[in-house]
Image (cartoon, helix red, strand yellow):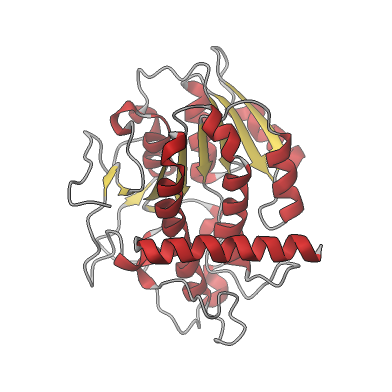
Amino acid sequence: MTDNLITTPFGAQTTAAEVVAGIDLGGRRAVVTGAASGIGRETARVLAAAGAEVTIGVRDLVAGARVAQEIAPASGPGSVRAALLDLTDQVSVRAFAQAWRGPLHMLVLNAGVMASPPERTKEGWELQFATNHLGHFALATGLHDALAAARGARVVTVSSVGHVNGDVLFDDINFEHHPYDPWAAYSQSKTANVLFTVEAARRWAPDQIAVNALNPGRITTTRLGRHIGDISNSPTTFDATSTDVSWKDIEQGAATSVLLAASPLVEGVSGRYFEDCNEAAPHRPGVRRGVAAHAVDPERAALLWQVSLDMLTAAATAA
């Protein structure tokens, strides 16, 4: 992240389709996670409409195949197919990555869970960290060779303004000692998304892989907030009425993801955090915008990468 912020002609009200208007993505291949609904579905739809061959990673293949059929373009070179991918199941993640053949030009790490009640994976990992970060970390690293083969691939990580509320709890990532707070766990996982971006951009620069993160804004109608009603007594408050948050519909919410995945306006840009189709400024206290210093710290980013590798290795060894 630098002082020279990247700007584009687009903004908070721009739609994903407007971002790629006139752009031909024919011959390019994309993977979008969490594309069965919400902004992931719209991201996949728009990329395919621009000519890309899109694979949506889904936990339910029957439902995923139906979505793929619904959003595939009626004509043109673009296409959509569904493939099994459960980010909370490392066997599933490895199988998806190992089954991939050929180059991968766009990887959109969109899937996520927000403020869920306490739940753990079979490895004992806290669910939000396991889904939002570890599953995507394993997927991206597993697809590294395919991304490198594209010679100019882009990885897009959907984070959240919620990252400003907290750093990664490196001494207790799985809330084994701290009281579980769904919003603190969410913030940790979204900070991890940005830290992954920082370190992956550094490590993968020689492979011409650009990696960027984004805040999509507050989307008015998605399933991401389905758990909010379960946590009204959470010790951490979350201001759902803040006026400095960009409220968007799904078409607008997918715009920054599509910009980073496909627009020539950000060609060669890597290791940045965007919101409203432009690079975000540093976060200021009291304002729910910008990128927090703890999320772009290179030492934290390198530490998280190693911790993530260690967690995945330990799980594979125990399996």
Residue 62 visible in the shown view? yes
Residue 134 spot, x, y in % from top left:
59, 59
- When the figure is inspected, residue 312 is found, relative to residue 78, above or below; the finding is below
Q: Residue at x 50, y 19 (%)?
A: 51
Q: Residue at x 56, y 66 (%)?
A: 307
- When the figure is inspected, residue 275 is found, relative to residue 46, above or below; the finding is below
Image quadrant holding the C terminus, namely: bottom right
Q: Residue at x 58, y 69 (%)?
A: 116
Q: Residue at x 25, y 62 (%)?
A: 243
Residue 59 visible in the shown view? no
Residue 23 spot, x, y in % from top left:
38, 19
Q: Is residue 32 left or right of residue 302?
A: right
What is the tally of numbered marks visible in this picture?
0
Residue lying at the far front in this picture: please name it. 206
Residue 189 spot, x, y in % from top left:
50, 64
Residue lying at the far right in this picture: please name it. 319
Q: Is residue 196 left or right of residue 272?
A: right
The front one of 299 and 253 is: 299
The front one of 172 and 111 is: 172
Q: Place residue 123 in its image quadrant.
A: bottom right
The front one of 23 and 316 is: 316
Residue lying at the far top in this picture: please name it. 76
Residue 315 spot, x, y in % from top left:
73, 64
- When the figure is inspected, residue 289 is found, relative to residue 53, above or below; the finding is below
